[in-house]
Image: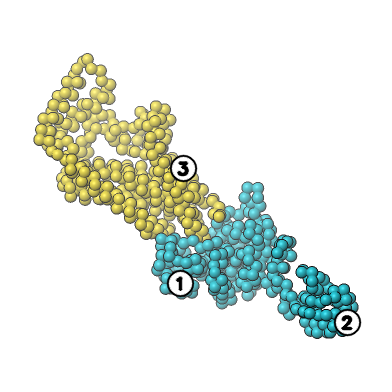
Chain colours: A yellow, B cyan
Amino acid sequence: MLKLIQNESIKIALRLRTWIMAALIVVIVLVAAIVINAHLKPNANWKQALLSQNAQAEATLSNPHVYLPPIDRSRIKAQVTINTYDIAHNLPPGHQDAWVFTIGSLSVGQIGVVFVTVLAGDIVAGEFASGTIKALLTQPVNRTRIILSKYVSVLLVTLAMFVLVLVSSIVIGGIFFGFNGVGEPLVFVNVKQMVTQMTTGSYILLGYAFALISGVMIVTIAFMISAVFRSSALAIALSIITLFVGVSLVQLLSSFTWDKYILFANTDLMQYITGGPPVAGMTMGFSIVVLAVYFIVLNAVSWRVFVQRDVSS
Amino acid sequence: MSNEVALEIKNLTKVIGRKTIVDDLSFAVRKGEVFGLLGPNGAGKTTTIRMIVGLIGITKGSVLVHEVDVTKDFESAMSHVGAIVENPEMYKYLSGYQNLLHFARMTPGVNRARIDEVVELVGLKSRIHDRVRKYSLGMRQRLGLALALLRDPSILILDEPTNGLDPAGIREFRDHLRSLASQRGMSVIVSSHLLAEMELMCDRVAIIQDGKLVDIRSINEMKGDAASAAQTTRFKVDNHELARSIFAKADLACQTAPDGRELDVMLDPLAVADVVAALVHAGVKVSGVRTVTRTLEESFLEMTGEVRHA
C-alpha cells in the first residue's frame, strides 16, 4: 500500500503544474506581506482615536432612546473591551507580526484548496483521459487499493499545501514584521459577541486545523467527481463550480432550517470560535456529525463507482 | 508445446444493456502456445480480452488463470498475466524508465535488475531515460511490451498489438512473440482482425463472430496440410467441355474456378503430368497449370459465411 501511495505522490510531484501552484502560493503570501507593509502607517494619535471611539460607543449604549438588539449591544461592548485592551498593551490597530500575518494567510489557504481541487479532480479522471487506467488496472492490485492510494495521496497534498502556507507565512511574515508575540494572548470576539482570549499560537493551530478539515471536505468532493466523470476537464470544472456555488448557496438559503444540512454550512468549524454559524442553533457537534456523514457518503460513492466501472473504449 | 492449460475461459458472456457482446464463449489456451482471437471488428474480441484482464465485469461464466478465478482472486490471477490492451498508453510526463519503475512498485519481487533486463530485451536501452512524450509509436509499443513482461508472466495478452505499427515494426513484434512462446514457454493470446497477421503469429486461432465462437483451428489445419496428397490444381484450357469429360473419365471432381475462365481439380501433384498428357492427347489446348493453395482468408470467409465483393 505504501508503494502505491508513493506511486501516486510521485505522479503528482513530477508534474510541472504542481510546482507552479506551490510557487504561486508562496508568491501570493509574499505579495500580501509587501502590500500590508506598504500600508502600515502608524497613526501617532491612534490611542486618542480609540478612546473617542469608545466614548462614542458608551454614549450609544447608555442612550435610552436608541433601540439596539441584544446581539449588537454585546458586539459594541466587545469592541470597546478590545479597544481598551489594545490601548493598555500598546497595540496599534492593524499591527502586524509574523503570527498575526499567519492568521491572515488562512485566506491564501483557501486559494490553495482550489489548487488542490484541480489535482484531485484530475487524479482519477486523468488516468481515463490518458488511457493509462488500462495499465494501472491490469496490475496484480485490486481496485480498492488503487483508489485508496489515490485518495490518501490527495489528502497528503492537501496537508502539504497547508503546511506550505503556514511555513511560508511565518517566514515571510517574520522577515517583514518580526517574530514578537507567539505566546501573547490573542483577543477576539467569540460567537456570543463576548471578548475571549487564547494564545496566538493556539489560535493559529486551531485555525489551520479547521481550515484543513474544510479543505479535506472540498477535495473529497473533487475526488468523487473525478471518480465519477472520466474527463479531467469536466471533473475539475465541476469541482470548482461546486465549491463556489456551494458557499453562496448556503447564504442564499439561510432562511430555511434545512440549510444547515448543506455541506458548506458546516465546513468552516472556525465559525464556532468566532463569527457564528449561518443558521441559529447549529453547534460544533452537529457540524462534525454532518461532515462525517458527507465524508462517508462521498467516499462510498467514489469507491463504488470506481470498483464497478467497466473500462472500455 | 505441452497440453498443460494456462488459461481457461468457460461460458464467458457479456451483456451490456440488451445487447449480448460476448455469447457463451469457451476455450483453453495451452502453455507455450500463441493463441489468436480472430474476427471482424465488433465481433467481441476486445470485450473478451477486457474480461480476461478484469477491465470489465463478467456477466456470466468464468476466467481461470492457472485454475484461479479472476473475479475471486484478482491479485493472484493477475500476477501471472501481462497485458497490453489496445495501444499501450504510458505516463507521457515520465521517462520510460520511470514508467516501468511505477508499475514495478505494483508487483512484489520486481526489482531494478529485472527492469534493466526487460529494457534490454525490447531494445530500448538507449532511450529509456527519455520522456515517453518524445517516443515514436514503435518505441511506445516496445515500452508497452516491456511493461507487460515486467513481472515475468506466464500468460501474455495482447489486444490488437500491431495496430498502428509499420511493417518492420510488425515483423519485429511478431519475432518477439514467437521467441517468447517457444523459448520461455509463455502462452500468448493475441487478438486481431487481420488474417495474414494471425497466420504468421499463431499456433491456434479461435474464430469469433457476433460474440460467438465459430471454430478453433490450428493454423496448419486452416492452411490445408502441406503434406496432404490432393491440392487444388487450376487448369487454363481452351475447351472446357472436352476437358471436363476427360476429368470425369479419370474420376476427378472438377469445378469452375472463381473467375469462371479456368477449371479447378483436386489432384495429387504427382498425377499432374499424366492429366496434362491426357488433355493434350484429346486435343485440349492447355495454356496454364498451377496449384492453388487455399488462402487462410478463403477458409475464414467460408467459415464466417461472409461474402466479400472484390
- Circles 1, 3 touching at the beta carbon (< 8 Å): no
Mark 1 Cα-neighbour bin, 10 Å: few <14, some 14–19, many ≥20: some
Amino acid type assigned to the residue bearing label 3 in the image: Val
Quarter occupied by residue A193: top left
Marks 1, 3: nearer the viewer: 1
Q: Which mark is residue A228?
A: none
Query: Which chain is home to disc 2?
Result: B
Task: Quickly name the residue at label 2.
Answer: B282
Query: Which chain is home to disc 3?
Result: A
Q: Earlier in the sequence, mark 2 or mark 1?
A: 1
Q: Position of residue A111 (x, y in %)?
A: 32, 45
Q: Position of residue B268 (x, y in %)?
A: 79, 80
Amino acid type assigned to the residue bearing label 2 in the image: Ala
Q: Residue A12 versus residue A5: which sits nearer the camera?
A: A12
Check disc 2 and report its element: helix, strand or loop: loop
Amino acid type assigned to the residue bearing label 1 in the image: Leu
Check disc 1 and report its element: helix, strand or loop: loop
Q: Which mark is residue B124?
A: 1
Residue B64 in view of the camera: yes
Q: Position of residue A196 (x, y in %)?
A: 22, 34
> From what the image shows, is residue A247 above or below residue B48?
above
Q: Is residue B9 left or right of residue A40?
A: right
- Circles 3, 2 touching at the beta carbon (< 8 Å): no
Check disc 3 and report its element: helix, strand or loop: helix
The Cα–Cα distance between marks 2 and 1, rounded to whole angstroms, is 66 Å
Q: Is residue B281 left or right of residue B110?
A: right
Share a chain, discs 2 and 1? yes
Mark 3 Cα-neighbour bin, 10 Å: few <14, some 14–19, many ≥20: few
Share a chain, discs 1 and 3? no
